[in-house]
Image (cartoon, grey):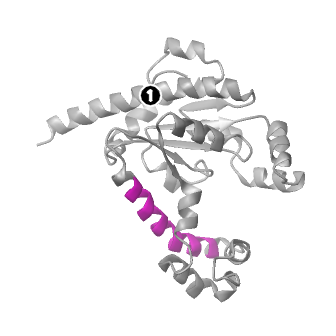
Amino acid sequence: MGRLKGQNPALWNFPHISQAAHWWPRFLSSVPMLYAHPVLLIGLTGGIGSGKSTVAALLEARGALIVDADAIAREVVEPDSPTLALLVERFGPEILGPDGALDRSALANIAFASSELRKELEAITHPAIGEVFFKRLAEAPSDAVVVHDVPLLAESAGALARGYGAIVVVEAPKELRLLRLDGRGVPRADAEARMAAQATDEERREIATHVIDNQGDHETLEYLVDGLWNDLLILRDENAALAAQVEELAP
């Protein structure tokens, strides 16, 4: 796992966490974007059933500030919100349930019928989601490690452009993911359909700076997250030092 540059001996101690070989060039190319944020921003993603949410909870227990993309998406369409009013105006009152809350299935049936309608949906929801996201960043302490939990990070060019200091991908073998989802009451056919609609493991690894192989027990995962957290703290301090140097050079 280890550090940000080259081969760090710490990597030898965490065999289930890998560091992308192309990390350093990607870091250099993203440096200007890092300073758009006053805190270190980390992307966290993984396919359904991979254990991403468990990793998020473990990072939070170690001091990370978690910004949950799905929670924000739900928040901006709560009853009586301006975003929900815009959705009803565009897609009709049939997207509401009897209690006036958004019926997500009804909205999906309409908005995902074509790419044009999906883009209209995104044009309404994405600005509201972005506003809350950047508000959370602005409210974070200056020494925070902000972990942005994004299920579909690899699928979103807009999300990738946010300037993450690192991207952590959680993965597990397909059959193990299916077993976990079955334990949560998700039928196998539905689980496989959801997996097929998401990025592949290879596509997620392509954007990763760190990969956590979550096919072991909880104790092993705790051990791996300890190593990851230490790495993120080093990155936070290096990022702060670089930001201070840039500030000193500013006219």
Left or right: residue 17 compared with residue 32: right
Left or right: residue 105 compared with residue 207: right
Q: How many marks?
A: 1
Left or right: residue 28 compared with residue 152: left
**Percent coordinates x, y for residue 103 in the rendering:** 69, 76
Foreground pick, 117 / 130: 130
**Percent coordinates x, y for residue 34 in the rendering:** 36, 42
Q: Quadrant of residue 71?
A: bottom right
Kindly identify the residue that appears in the image at 31 percent across and 45 percent down. Answer: 38
Foreground pick, 93 / 173: 93
Q: Quadrant of the N terminus?
A: top right
Q: Is residue 94 above or below residue 109?
A: below
Q: Residue 119: say if magenta.
A: yes
Q: Is residue 62 visible?
A: yes
**Percent coordinates x, y for residue 127 in the rendering:** 45, 68
Which stretch is magenta? 117-136
**Percent coordinates x, y for residue 212 in the rendering:** 63, 30
Q: Main secondary structure of the magenta part?
A: helix
Q: Quadrant of the C terminus?
A: top left
Write down the residue under mark 1: 24
Amino acid found under the numbered disc labelled 1: Trp
Kindly identify the residue that appears in the image at 88 percent across and 54 percent down. Answer: 187
